[in-house]
Amino acid sequence: MRRRDAAWGAVVVAISVVTGALDRQAFAVDPDVSAGGARSPIVHYDVVPTRIVWQSAKGVGSPESLLKAQPPQPLLASPVPPCTLTASDDGPAGVLLDFGRELQGHVELYTPLASTKDPVRVRVRFGESASEAMADLGERSAQNDHAIRDQVVTLPWLGTQSIGPSGFRFVRIDAVDPGKSVMLSQVRAKLGVRDLPRIGSFRSSDPRLDRVWQVGADTVHLCMQGYLWDGIKRDRLVWIGDMHPEFRSIEAVFGHVDVVPTSLDLTRDATPVTEWMNGISSYSMWWVLIHEELWMHRGDRAYLEAQRPYLTKLLERLAALVDADGRERIDGMRFLDWPSSPNQEGVTAGLQGLLVMTLDAGARLMDVLGDDSVAGVCREAADRGRKVVPDVNGSKSGAALLALAGMRDAKETAQNTLLPGGPAGVSTFYGVYVLEALAEAGEIDAALDFVRVYWGGMLDLGATTLWEDFELAWTENAGRIDELVPPGKKDIHGDCGAYCYEGFRHSLCHGWASGPTSFLSRRVLGVTVAAPGMTKLRVEPRLGKLQWAEGTYPTPLGALFVRHEKRPDGSVATTIRSPAGIEIEGPPGAAIESVAAAALPQSSGERYGGLTPPGDGLLPQGLLCEGLTDPAGIDARAPRLSWRFEGGPSSRRGLRQTRYQILAASAPGLLELGKADRWDSGIVASDETASIVWSGEPLVSGERVHWTVRVWDEAGVPSRFAPPATFLIGQLDAND
């Protein structure tokens, strides 16, 4: 698609620069870590598939056995019959499994006691979408970069085979050798994640915002592996610019996690100060900005002192890139985010603002370190740079950075650049800075609408984590990622994407997209750090049209609780409970209570290490007509339809149905939007799930009807359509 060759070429250059730096800086690696023996921070959890999305027409037996929970151990005998896959000369035999949510880790295949020990082979394909798991290598950019997603493996006799790791939700397994049956007693995913308590939280009068906050937390949670990765399918690397929104989300959800300084130091030690981190000039600037925020959150003077040699030289280098006329002269790869790349005027404007912000932050850090000379150099360069305000050429990313740097009026920037077109032109990476700039302009309602529509748009398509990039234009006539794409619909994964992430190469779990999580905590709850080490916090609520919002924010002394609620006169009542030892600067009239400081828990104590459980949402199941499953001989002209929810609504979010839509058709192939020929109820606002009276076309004797339903939860997120059901009309009239 757009500028792919040039964009990908830049990535290759950046990677080659980093690789060379690693070769030169090998001496900087901690020998204790390098030699092995350190305890991994990653904990593994078994995940059982939640459903079978697809199976081949022939050669598959007892696939439902793979959905049953069993002891994670091969057995000599099991009451559950194994799933059998038998390929033929006509082709492979396979199944496509859904594990209910995006995961990072492996998949384990268990084999039972077989009559022969002849080796058997299977082809295993991972996918972040159902369609990716069905794709061949090379098809719409499906590939094995960074993690092997498509391979043929040999299975042991009466044993277990582990395949991976990768980022995935779906796994397709095929027997590939004609005439050889493959028996699978179990298929399990091994989720690998840090077991971390979620100290932070966010709830409001808008469940859709709550859901985006939670999905952003899940996204960055999965990206915290041994180091802080950009994504779990790709690139599985530390990219410093990506880390800034990730770091903010981590602080808002988990508090301090050592993966942040470890990843900062890894990249520092791999990059001579004469080069740019990850080969990108702006990423070295983000390294400085993260360090100032880390200092404010942690107040770790010894750690900041350890950065002094590198930080000093980097700041001197950056200051020298501001000419006497105030214009930046940044060399190397000039990059903000991918969607901004074609707009070089916008990139130049953004880099000017980012450089000024970096030098301001550097001056403050040098003040802390007592280096008046370098602090002065930074201030002088920042003051020169502040006088030059380049035209943004419509770039929302560039305009947002200039506004946040205080170089453009925030209100004017919002009205002339950020608000026109709504979220169009926003990226999942720099979108958080657009949100922050809108908040600075007093446009909190517009910012929240951006969150609902843009980031919420991914949830509407089945996302359980936030994506590397997204454009609202992609959604037109698009299928969901958790279903095989119906004929005539666009594949939101395989048919979309741009730059270096076209098609299935596009990552559907990317940490830089988690920005709304920190934004909602920082700007709606209004919690910001006013003194190093969080010894002083500022609480400035911005509810906009929300009726209330509440939540917690992690501090070194325990969780800070805040609640804001509108009074009948429109004013806001604020309640704050703060750990003792923290000074609170709250809004006038706030009720502030000091509570005993408490040590933060070291583990979540929850399944899946605190990650939202698989299948955590509403999905209608058990469709009934007149209280019966697929009945024949219904004698009602207006039968009553019902459904239930598998396992009940999620206790995590207290979900409930708010809307439903029923489709009914004369043939299974017509059970699609726009094709249902017997009934399309439209979207009905109701929490009813029982005895919904037929209101479609008049039914006639002997007619078989196929039907399905989907529902919306409180967050306005639609489910998939349920597995179809049928009913057969009996004799309605004596003359029939």
Image (spheres, rainbow, N blue to C red):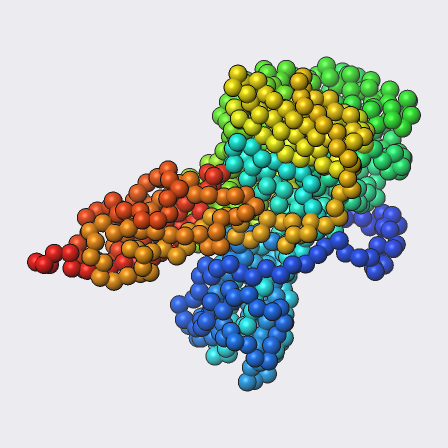
Residue at image position (53%, 60%) is: 49
Residue at image position (26%, 55%) is: 705
How far across and how far down the image is residue 78, in percent? 55, 76
Q: Is residue 124 above or below residue 619?
A: below
Please state if 537 lies on the left or on the right of 73 as rendered: right
Quarter holding residue 592: top right
Quarter holding residue 12: top right
* Viewer can see residue 499: no
Please state if 556 lies on the left or on the right of 653 as rendered: right
Please state if 464 lies on the left or on the right of 198 as rendered: left
Residue at image position (47%, 68%) is: 63
Which is more toward the observer, 147 or 533? 533
How far across and how far down the image is residue 92, in percent? 47, 70
* Viewer can see residue 613: yes
How far across and how far down the image is residue 579, in percent? 76, 33
Which is more toward the observer, 188 or 393? 188
- The quadrant in which the C terminus is found is bottom left
